[in-house]
Amino acid sequence: MPKASTRIKTYRNANGPVVSTVDRRVFEQDGLTFKDIDGSGTLSAVNDWRNTPAERAAAYVKVLSVKEKIAQLFISDWRMAKYPMTGPMAAMYKDMERKTDAYGILDEGEFRGKTIFGEQHLPSTTTLLKEWFNRHVILRANATPADMADWMNEAHAVCEQCEHFIPVAAASNSRNENGELVFGMNDAGGVLATWPGTLGIAAAVKGYRIDLVDKFAATVRREWNACGLRKGYMYMADTMTDPRWQRTYGTFGEDPALISEIMTHIIPGIQGSAQGVTADGVAVTTKHFPGGGARENGFDPHYAAGQWNVYATPGSLETYHLPPFAAAVKAGTASVMPYYSKPAAAKSEPQHDLQGNVIEMEPYGFAYNRYFIDTMLRGQMGFTGYINSDTGIAHNMAWGVEMLDVPERIGFAVNHAGVDIISGLFDNDAGQQAYDRAHTDYYDTHPIPQGFTKDQLVLTDEALDRAVTRTLTELFALGMFEDPFRDPETAERVVADPADRAAAAEAHRRSVVLLKNDGTLPLSSDRKIYAEAFLKNPEQAKAATQALRAELADCTLVDDPAEADAALLFVSPSSGEYFNATPGYLELDICENKTVHNVDAEGRPTAETHTETTLSGAGRLAEIAAAVHAHGGKVISNINFTMAWQVGNVERLSDVLLAGFDTYRDATLDVIFGRFVPTGKLPITLPRSDEVLAVNEAGVCVSPNDVPGFAKDRYMPDALKDENGKAYAYRDAAGHYYEYGFGL
């Protein structure tokens, strides 16, 4: 039998939806075509697309079995047969059985083992869909548009063979930004129209116009919809306030007003409407409520040291962190993802909710925190969509509820806090246990954990139906029950649209920020040029240097900086490892083999030290600059900002300094050679030095981690302030402060 993509049958309804199917029965009534979704063979409330999505979802939960409904509570990673697992999870899947379906599309191998999110036995794709009845998966493969469409079609075809049809809702993290692929952030890149990093979009918008976001969102919607991807774990409404937070590059910067404006445009643009998702839209999951930026000295909550959100200054939560999420809710975001972390009452100043009440800082991770989800997000912000937890909360990142077993954590999250999808593992069995405990005498013979009640820890029919109704409503609104199938050739054609590529190229150019220029720019192409790229990884630096020199093929290149009229230095630092698992604080200095202090389990500095390198060959920068300057040449440096780097070691050597944010090299070169006048502005403030990031023996930073860079000076010690009352931002030799909104 041919693959599903070649067997799609399509029916068009006048003033109604397109109906597509491979094997599912369709029938005509009243001159219209309907799909037999619920298997009843009748024009039921579920099958009748003239009913509202909410009405159809409410009817369907009455049809589905408990087992089928429990399966809808979970979402986890899934594989594509043609694309082996890559990134930090690859080693964990190395022993997985290699087996595909007859078309080489679906991964039919089994897996037993541990990931960073827990231990699991995973079946074949067909078994997952037909027998387990799971419908929510996360695709991370960097696949072609045609392959994504083929995979989605084959998966939907398997689902059509079930008694009750529910399409596969495949989610992905962002795929339309340039940069290193990072698990859980940007799952893929370079296939779809590729814009600068998220910080770069903010830099471009800050210096230009918000309609740039409209173009970006429209591109994402068209491309993802064409490929069959209908749910995005994006974008971050987090305000970056702690400069050591490794996920800085995934934010839109440090200004809650700008982030809110972007949310107001990007969410309706991707979803298709300001009223929510449409049949040609992609559902947006806004993350990480109530804001992941308020880290404690950069510690990541994937690890125990980072499990707290600390609000060191009065009113910071409501002033800086909540507004972008309120904007996202108002813009109709389909779902919201709470962060792993939990509020730290003992380390925080009083914070107030949207009604002026002092916030109850119960020490539960935000996915377990009823006050934040039910009282604030739903009650005060008016959010009506569904809650999608961050990945791993039921197992390895169960901050605040470690005393509960996994079924109890599921019950507490869904029944008590109001979570609708739990990400991490396919915990169907544990979900069934949570349900059974509500309907049996389990707690007659097992103790209820202290501080909890049975009603909080079990999965009731009411909570189960509520959660599944919300997620089904989205699938109906997206038109996925009627028309889930996509044409691979159309997907390729849509993604190849030159207009989208041109819009992305313009965004790259507009993302470039000119920080310093002594009159050297624009550079004449007839000058003798020395060009080199620097990264943390030396081998990657060699490849990047070759690519840079190839883009300068029309220039006169020299191999010795002493012979150059100008040196072009492309500097791309990197700090820490996966999720910031380092012995100390994340290093922001552009350095090589720098001795820094370790930290203890409580996040306090210790006497022990280790060395950190954020840029291999950093010591050579001064040598190159000296050789060029010795005969009157100029040094032009470009720094790629994925974090708020301390730029002193580069700026002091440079006659020209530019900032990029995973910006294409050719866009930066356009600015350097005068082919484009830079408009970008800094979306973050760059810290002056280690001095303004110092952490005392108690683990408290001299600059509060819950306040954005542009507001930190009001909290800085007077001893650190200059004649202008400024302490935090870097100041160059010309007297310019590299703070939010700066750019020549």
Image (cartoon, helix red, strand yellow):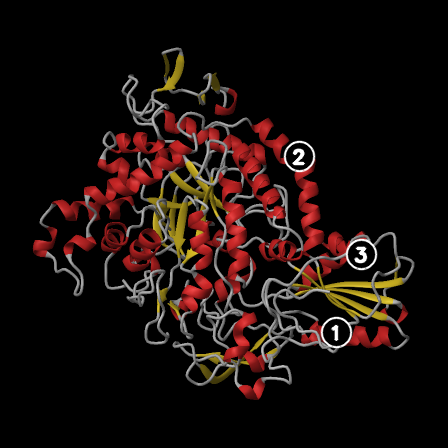
Position of 496 compared to 119: left or right? right
* Residue 80 badge: none
Q: In the rendered structure, which amino acid carries the disc numbered 2?
A: Asp
Sequence-first disc among 3 and 2: 2
Residue count near mark 2 (Cα–Cα under 10 Å), binned few <14, some 14–19, many ≥20: some
Give above or below for 637 relative to 69: below
Say whether residue 104 is visible: no
What residue is pinned by disc 2?
497
Residue count near mark 3 (Cα–Cα under 10 Å), binned few <14, some 14–19, many ≥20: some
* Residue 549 badge: 3
Q: Is mark 1 on a helix, strand or loop?
A: helix
The spot of residue 2 in percent (x, y) is 50, 20
Front in this rendered view, residue 474 or 622: 474
Question: How many numbered dots are placed on residues in this image?
Answer: 3
Q: In the rendered structure, which amino acid carries the disc numbered 3?
A: Arg
Q: Distance between the residues labelled 2 and 1?
A: 43 Å
The spot of residue 509 in percent (x, y) is 72, 52
* Residue 620 badge: 1
Sequence-first disc among 2 and 1: 2
Sequence-first disc among 1 and 3: 3
Residue at x 64%, y 52% (from the top left corner): 196
Q: Is mark 3 on a helix, strand or loop?
A: helix
Q: Are marks 3 and 2 in contact (CB under 8 Å)?
A: no
Q: How far apart are marks 3 and 2 (CA)?
A: 29 Å
